[in-house]
Image (spheres, rainbow, N blue to C red):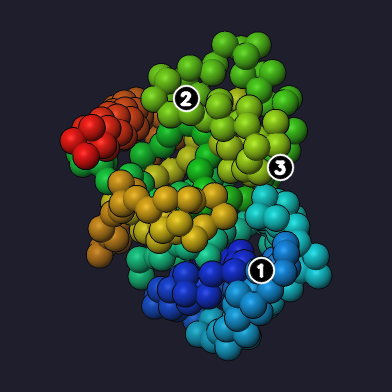
Amino acid sequence: MILAPIVLFVYNRPYHARQTVEALQKNELALASELYVYSDAPKNENAITKVNEVREYIKTIDGFKKVTIIEREKNLGLADSIIDGVTKIVNEYGKIIVLEDDLVTSPFFLRFMNEALEMYQNESNVASIHGYIYPIGGLPETFFIRGADCWGWATWKDKWAVFEPNGQKLLDELKDKKLTKEADFNGSYGYTKMLKRQIQGKNNSWAVRWYVSAFLKNMLTLYPKQSYVQNIGHDSEGTHCTAETDVYKVVLSKKYSISKIETTEDTVARKKIEIFHNSLKLSFTKRVLLKLKRWFIK
């Protein structure tokens, strides 16, 4: 099996980047894998110190077959940096594994990614492989959900080619085909709202465009029963995370299992994800009511 290159995107969080790399080094296939690290340039003077600290650290990384560092000379922003880096590397190698600097992996992450890439590379309706799954019980060992995802993922050159960077074009197609509610998991998660905000320049999400691009092509992403990825970025330090939360916290898988399944969406798993999204909205409402109650008491 020819291993896919790993591409890691870092910015100004030295602690998070170190956690991500150290977990990745513990993966079984790390020593046989090539690692590319993209370091975006500081967007302002306040970011210079932390960016330089990250850049000093990534120069010390070992434990991989080869480490290549790309230091951006100007700030591209997360979305453009990822789109540019993924496109370049996947076009060169034909496949790719992608991580950001706040994703801690199980020691079995690389094996799951590489074996799934090998297993489904000739399936035209499979867009990507994903390492993270929400803390949901009762799922099969692996399953497919329509669309694509962004917390530790892998894809192929021909599948990444469906990525549409024009958010307005994606939104128009969703509306024309009356798919907004379905894309939003029956209204339980605001992908459409996120896409609208990207169009308005209120966020710069590449991930929502990747999700909708694959969704509109009726393509699928493979997920594991138990997560191989933990997101440690919900601590107010991330570019797109402004408040601490542990609702997405998972227990990383301590075992590895994969076998090929039929490439159709698992409607039961999809419903479970919808229920999970709705539970978060309910939890948010409860938290707001509790805060109001405390405020009135005071």
Q: Secondary structure at mark 1?
A: helix
**Labels 2 & 3 near each other (Cβ < 8 A):** no
Question: Residue most toward the front?
Answer: 298
Whole-number angstrom distance, CA of label 2 to CA of label 3: 23 Å
Q: Which residue is mark 2?
A: 184
Image quarter of residue 286: top left
2 vs 3, front mark:
2
Q: Which residue is mark 3?
A: 161
- Residue 133 placed where, x, y %? 36, 47
2 vs 1, front mark:
1
Q: Secondary structure at mark 3?
A: loop
Q: Residues within 10 Å of mark 3 (few under 14, many from 20)?
A: few
1 vs 3, front mark:
1
What numbered label is drawn on residue 46? 1
Whole-number angstrom distance, CA of label 1 to CA of label 3: 36 Å
- Residue 92 placed where, x, y %? 74, 61
Q: Amino acid at mark 3?
A: Ala
Which quarter of the image is occupied by the C terminus? top left
Q: Residue at x 54, y 61 (%)?
A: 100
**Labels 2 & 1 near each other (Cβ < 8 A):** no
Q: Amino acid at mark 1?
A: Asn
Q: Nearer the viewer, residue 192 or 290?
A: 290
Depicted 57 relative to depicted 267: above or below: below
